[in-house]
Image: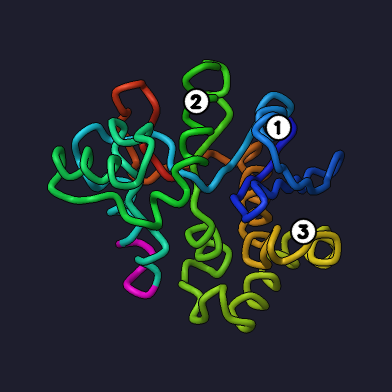
Amino acid sequence: MKTIGLDGCRAGWIAISLDEDGAGYWLLESNEEFEAIFGAYDRIFVDVPIGLEDDTYVRECDELLRQRLGPDYQASVFNPPIRPALHAPTYGEASMVSYEATDKKVSIQAWNITPKIKLVDQLLQNNEPYREKVFESHPELLFQILNGGNSILQKKATKKGLRHRLGLLKKQSKYADDFFRDIKEEYRRNQVDEDDIIDAMVLALFALRSVNDDMQTIPEDPPTDSTGLPMAIHYV
């Protein structure tokens, strides 16, 4: 089974596979390149909301994830737009649709990644088999698990926080150190940032782990949205 982790970056997406056969990394700058990954891999962990509420501002999985991560990391979990606002052409219109249904506007943070949410959603709507192999996850939850269930004291935007997370990855994969260095050297910071690399790498690690270990979800019995997509955070 071929596995991969995907994280959004300024240039598009950074994709990393830690498979023993076929380990590598790729910068995906077009929708076509991104879709090709969906077709080529059997287990994909991605840090993007999958499954959207129609008229509720907060998904249950996001609220539970905030509780699990603790107060220091609640800001790393944001509320995606509701489905009726997903295809609004402007931020103002998306916020108006959201406000009419939920009394709350779409956050700027959520709006900034709405094109990525739309891309993933479109692929899952148009390709039923993808729903069996593409799973939403969250890097900070995965790093908490690697850290023995304890939140990392330093945020990943700091040098200490970055080193701590990379150190955890190096203990789990022989590729981690080289991939981190090579990606930094190959791509500019305005294409891929350092925290994008470690996020994609931890997603890749847990996608690989999920081949042999049972996946778990937050919540344990996740609801589905109006299109049948689960609203859940996956981990191992």
Label 2 – label 3 distance at C-alpha: 33 Å
* Place of residue 178 in the rendered image (x, y in percent of width and height, measured from the top left): 85, 64
15 in magenta: no
Q: CA distance from mark 1 to mark 2?
A: 15 Å
Pointer 1 residue? 37
Q: Secondary structure at mark 1?
A: helix
Dominant secondary structure, magenta: helix
Kindly identify the amino acid type of the residue bearing the numbered disc 2: Gln
**Contact? badges 2 and 3 (CB < 8 Å):** no
Specify start and end residues of the magenta stretch as a single range: 67-72
Element type at marker 3? loop
Q: Label 2, on which residue?
A: 122
Q: Which residue is mark 3?
A: 173
Please, which residue is most extreme toward the bottom here? Answer: 160
Q: Disc 2 on helix, strand or loop? A: helix
Residue appearing at x 65%, y 38% in the figure: 212
- In the image, residue 57 sits, relative to residue 198, either above or below, namely above
First along the sequence among labels 1 and 2: 1
Quadrant containing the N terminus is: top right
Q: Is residue 185 above or below residue 163?
A: above
Residue drawn at x 32%, y 28% is 224
Left or right, 129 with respect to 182, comes to left
What residue is at 72 percent from the left and 28 percent from the top?
36
What amino acid is at disc 3?
Answer: Ser
Q: Is residue 28 visible?
A: yes
Callout 1, which amino acid? Ile
